[in-house]
Image (cartoon, rainbow, N blue to C red):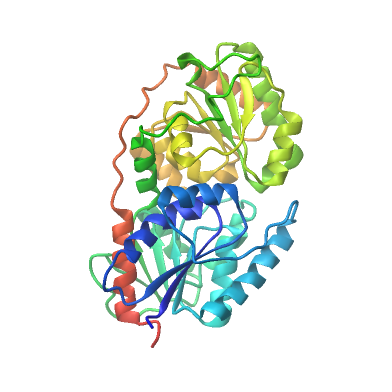
Amino acid sequence: MRPILLFVIGTRSEALASGPVIQRLRALPDAPFQVRVATTGQEDTELAQALMVTGVVPDTRVEVKQPHLADANLNAALLDQAERLLRHQLPAAVVAVGSSATAWAAGLAAWFKGFPLIHLRAGVFAKPGSRPMPDWMHRAALTPLPALHLCPDETALEALRKRLGDQPVSLGVFDPEGKPRGEADAWACVVGDPADEVLAASLASESEPPDPVLSMPLPNGSVPSESDLRRVIAFLSRREHHANGLRPLCEALDALSQRHPARHFVAVHSLQSHICDALVALLPRRTNLRDVSPLPHPAFIREVARSPLVITDSVGLAREAILLRRPLILVGAYSETESLAVLAEEARVSYRVIEMDQAAIESAVEEILGEEPAEPVQVFAASPASERAAQAILAWWGIVNPLG
């Protein structure tokens, strides 16, 4: 039996980033390992939607999610289940993605059990002076552990080098099309972000039927017209904005919807109970203001692509908005990363970073909506990040040989 390369994923973002890599590795006829995928219960509906888009079928599932599960309890449950998972699967190497609680648990469990760790989306740190919750702690714990760091860009690689500068870890860098040479405690390379490939495919999927949620009658009973389709999209999911932390946004959207009756505003749920319950309780329903359940990824991307403004605290959605050249408000300085700032500069897209404050949100929205709207992006070309990531894993595997 071939050794196991185990991907552990638990969120929409992780599924979108890892999906193209998983599919590419599974398609290799002579791969030196078998690819297995384990999912956790950190996110449910959002994760299932992302898996459906990428076509990845998990091999096993770890159940940990419960309603209103506290942060510490979630992390503890994920770490316990991740250790159990690794004892059962006995992988030759483990792949974790990003900086979620699932990635943190998979990384620590792999380290505890002595399995080599591969980290996809490595080096994506918040800007200096910011400590986003809980990402900062997750990243700090994960960074010294991987045997292979797969960075999305040169900015992330440089940030990784700086963070490892005071660690007892020697880092070697290689090109995915080459091979690691020499000796090092860990290896790193720049592969791009495979989620961009899913973004491009979702944008191109015009054959998809209209999303049934957004095609439903408006609160006044009328059916949305073509002029209603360019909606201001708000999506927030960070821990800092749980429960009553969403009140400033909801009150700002309410005030804006009344001042701009011809504009349509949509708040998209994260199905974390602290977000979902807060939106239901705090956001008024008006003809031009509504909250909706999480949308399938292709439908959501098409909404973002034609939106006059995206408001979010999600680094993943912020990246998608920048790539699609959409006006963007990032809520919370802790949501901004070094890579995101460089990407925006390269794409010549400006965005505003504001605090969760009603007056600040209203002012920023008014300013952006008063500007000449950019034309929606029709086609987006993604770099072959999944191919580069697969090449890097194969090159590292052949040189390092996790089975010794």
Q: Is residue 140 visible?
A: no
Q: Is residue 77 visible?
A: yes
Q: Is residue 298 above or below residue 360?
A: below
Left or right of residue 186: residue 138: right
The residue positioned 35% from the left and 47% from the top of the image is 197
Rendered position, 73 above or below 197? below
Q: Looking at this view, is 288 or 157 the one in front?
A: 288
Image height check: is 254 above or below 404? Answer: above
Q: Is residue 204 left or right of residue 109?
A: left
- Farthest residue toward the left? 178
Which part of the image, by quadrant, shows the C terminus?
A: bottom left
Residue 165 percent location from the top left of the image? 46, 69
Residue 109 x %, y %: 58, 74
In this rendering, the count of numbered labels is 0
Residue 196 in the image: state x and y as whole percent: 37, 46
Residue 320 falls left or right of residue 273 = left
Residue found 73% across the figure and 61% down from its top: 72
The quarter in which the N terminus is drawn is bottom left
Judge by depth and name the residue closer to the eye, 55 or 271: 55
To which quarter of the image does residue 322 belong? Answer: top left
In the image, 253 versus 175, the foreground residue is 253
